[in-house]
Image (tube, grey):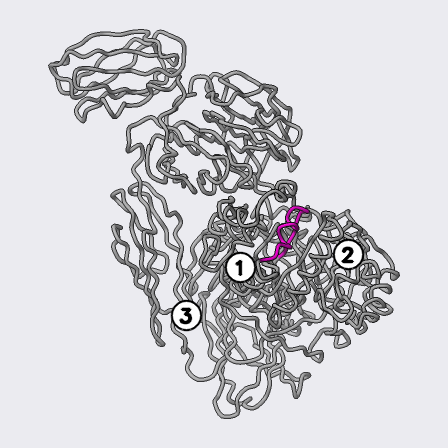
Amino acid sequence: MLLRYSYSGLNSARLRHLAWALVLLLLNSLPALAQLEPAAQYTKLSVAQLLAWTPTGPTAVPANVSRVALAARQNSLSTQLNPNQSFSHKVNYIPDGMTGFAGYLNEQNRFNLYNFTHWQYIDVLTWFDGPVALPTRPWVEAAHRNGVKVIGSVFTSAADVNLLIQKDGSGEYTAAQKLVDVANYYGFDGWFFNQESSVPTATATELRNLLKRLQQLRPAGMEIHWYDAMLPSGSISYQNALNANNQLLLQDGSARVSDAMFTNYFWSGPNNINTSVTTAQNLGRSPFDVYMGADLWPGRNPQALFTQTAWIDNYFTGGNPAQPRLSLGLFATNLTYNGGLNSFNSSAADYAGFYRTEQRLFAGNDLDVTTEDASGWKGFGSYVPVRSVINSLPFDTYFSVGQGKLFANNGEQLTKGWTDMGKQSLLPSWQWNKSGAAPITVGYDFSRAYYGGNSVKLQGSLSGSNSATVKLFQTKLPLPSTTPANLDVTFKTAAAGPSHTQLLLYFTDDLANPAALDLGAVSDTLWNTRTLSLAGYAGREIALIGVQASAAAAVTDYRLNLGRLKLYTGAAVTTKPAVDFTASATVVVPNQTVTFSNASTNASSYFWTFEGGTPATSTAVFPTVQYAAPGTYSVKLRATNAAGRDSLTRTGYITVVAPGSSGGNTSLSFDGATKYVDAGPINLTGSALSMECWLKPNGFKATSPFISSVMGMEDGANTALVRLGDANQAANRLQFVMLVNGIARKVNSPTDLLAGTWYHVAATFDGSVMRLYLNGQLNASLNATGSFVANSNFFMGRNFDNSRVLNGALDEVRVWTRALTPAEILAGRCAVPSTAAGLEGYWTFNEGSGLVTVDQTGHGHQGALVNMTPTDWSTNVPSACVSMAVQPARATAELGVAAVVNPIHGNVAQVEIRGAQGQSTLVQLVNLLGAVVWQQQIRPATAAERLSVPVTQAAGLYVVRVSNATGTATVKLLKQ
């Protein structure tokens, strides 16, 4: 079955007692559902939010509107690797849980997010999640460039269906029109219905009637797919085929109900396929409207990829790719990313493993799409022809896959991890179509790029008598008879001198004899661009574009990187630039360096303007800037080329905050629904860590999964977090969760926490034991030897989903790259030096205002307050730490106290008292319990008076409090 996404729907009994008008009034108050970044929060809706949706309403996301139309494809068999394949059948490609690893609108600062590069083999991508999952713009745009449709999903509970089938005052199904409106607004291509909760027969009939109405309302080209789970009776029974039991959900007499049926996976052999084909034909429908489901996830169903291989032959008569019987429905295709076949989802270092796994999916176990595997998995490329959208001029590609460990623009490179499918280029039609005797390998090179994060690399050796040919693109490009065409090739070689490379053009009228255009010699190893005239080929049609490596003499170290390919007529530059940029950080402290990443295209020069920055302007591709003063500043980039200019101003883009600017002692309150703090990516990966904070829960989750997040990260394999509750842990008990050596380990506290009470919580891992501390005392532990991966965004008050937001308050949050000792935990409960060894992030929450909490370590992990307001700052702090800061209402600008050396290692501390000259002043030493353990009355003779303070008590945290008639000031002392 498809059921992977879990949800908690509205209670159906309550709904029966609510007037429909009242429900509509409340819809917009429901919290946003989870996505990979906050900007995409309303690309995942509840059914209630769908019904209330309008293009100008609060849940509309203009930034998610696709700007790329669906490209037209041409189907040509003569240039396929196997000309006997067929274009009759289609492929629906369904990664499971797209919002979790692809739900973003903007460039992400991680290389190791899910990606896809084989669009040419598929027809539809289903954005599978729920309850109402809307595809995100970067993925829709990448798919549309390749002629692939993207459809959202409606994954509903029984209670959701009760809402979905509601009619308005005129008897219209509100949801039918809303589904059409939403898809039209965002520019995606339809819906996939997945109903795996049983409903009464009358409700099921209404749902079928809604689908019929949707058929009448949808525009041409929009597709509605139904998944084989619920029967017309409303019961759940997976048929694993299109048959008499479920056919009414595809076709009801003369009424078209759905455009396609996606069957379940519990089948093997030809019988279920035979039934599906016969049923479709009897209904007057094409068998290719049936996507026979295959669950590719390892070890789960009869189609488990790479271990089960014979199943795919059943889709074809006699296993012959020329005679498909129905279409392919491929589920859990994200196995290439998080199916255990590589470690890319947890470690960007294994990018080669990830791309090799996807190549294997389509090219077979031998990773060679040009030859069919003799046994085992042959790859989808053996059964499915490529579809090309390269049908007209101009044609331009940077070979960018849309992610990388560096970002390049016009050959200048900036080191950073990033992912953005919106920046993906049209990619080679085959990965990879290589022939010839020369030992040349071909693949993506993530160390060299002209634009984006990669290039295509050919590497190996040439004997002087052999060669290697790589066919890159299947095309259908007619060259005009009157206006000469040109081909620009941007490339770099391993050494100066001959390139030993020819570009090959195969023409439709003579596929056997390609034209070879020599790239010539180069004088350096930088990026070079050659303009090749195609005037001699006017009036002919290019069917294939390839490249050949050959040499008259032996070349032991051949390497060619392709960075751009552009085929055009007329002037080389006819389109003005398109400007885009991002910053390494948008919330910084004074004088923190910000690097700007320039993603503009087609530009020859740049001019930056940095309000409040140094420098104030720049013409660099990737400038670095510092800001001296707190404030909010705009950034403008203008890009120019021979055709014109484009500019982009990001207003209020950079926020500069001063550490500890308030001087107060405050905490942050979270609402249990939508409010949390995002500190951005923090790399804690290794064999030791610690997390600690003060926690005051105000309430506990009463519904599954009973989880309230406290702090940490939970992003696939990047898991290290502290939370309250779990499926088998009471909602008011702490839990420390990590993946140690890839295995989930959970330390469960046996202690019930009370609402309204402050607790100090610490979690440590030293490579062999996970420990959970409560109020400085060991509370629970678990033996777990190994290392872990934790390199993702660090959240406070939320992880994974808005339904897991903390209802309570946090203070003094810290994360370390080492395991703290029990003594350190006890001594540092209220404060530690910001320069302490191994302290990676430290948020005191003492700002008291604003939407940023500053990382006191200087590492730049500023915390953004998401959905929070000024009233979420609170002076309710742990009583043990109540005198840990200057009290703003009583302090003056003149009075101050500072530790000369901190921490202290003996029994005497040196402090300096300022602004008390000639005044009777009381100096006190206060312990964590608030008790005065030493005091002395003094009258300083100078403006900065030094005083020895005896600290004879045990190691720990103390406060020196200085007070006189003008106010009070304090300083923290750590005795070690």
* Residue 236 in view: yes
Residue 639 in the image: above or below residue 14:
below
Q: Which of pointers 1 and 2 indicates the residue nearer the eye?
A: 2
How far apart are the alpha carbons under marks 3 and 1?
19 Å
Q: Which mark is residue 602?
A: 3
- Label 3's element? loop
How far apart are the alpha carbons under marks 1 and 2?
39 Å
Q: What is the three-letter code of the residue carrying label 2?
A: Pro
**Magenta stretch: includes residue 904:** no
**211 and 416: which one is in front?**
211
Q: Is residue 159 left or right of residue 229?
A: left
How far apart are the alpha carbons under marks 2 and 3?
55 Å
Q: Which mark is residue 232?
A: 2
Q: Which residues are magenta?
A: 153-168
Q: Quadrant of residue 365?
A: bottom right
The residue at which mark 1 appears reads as 421
Q: Which callout, 3 or 1, points at the residue further toward the start of the chain?
A: 1
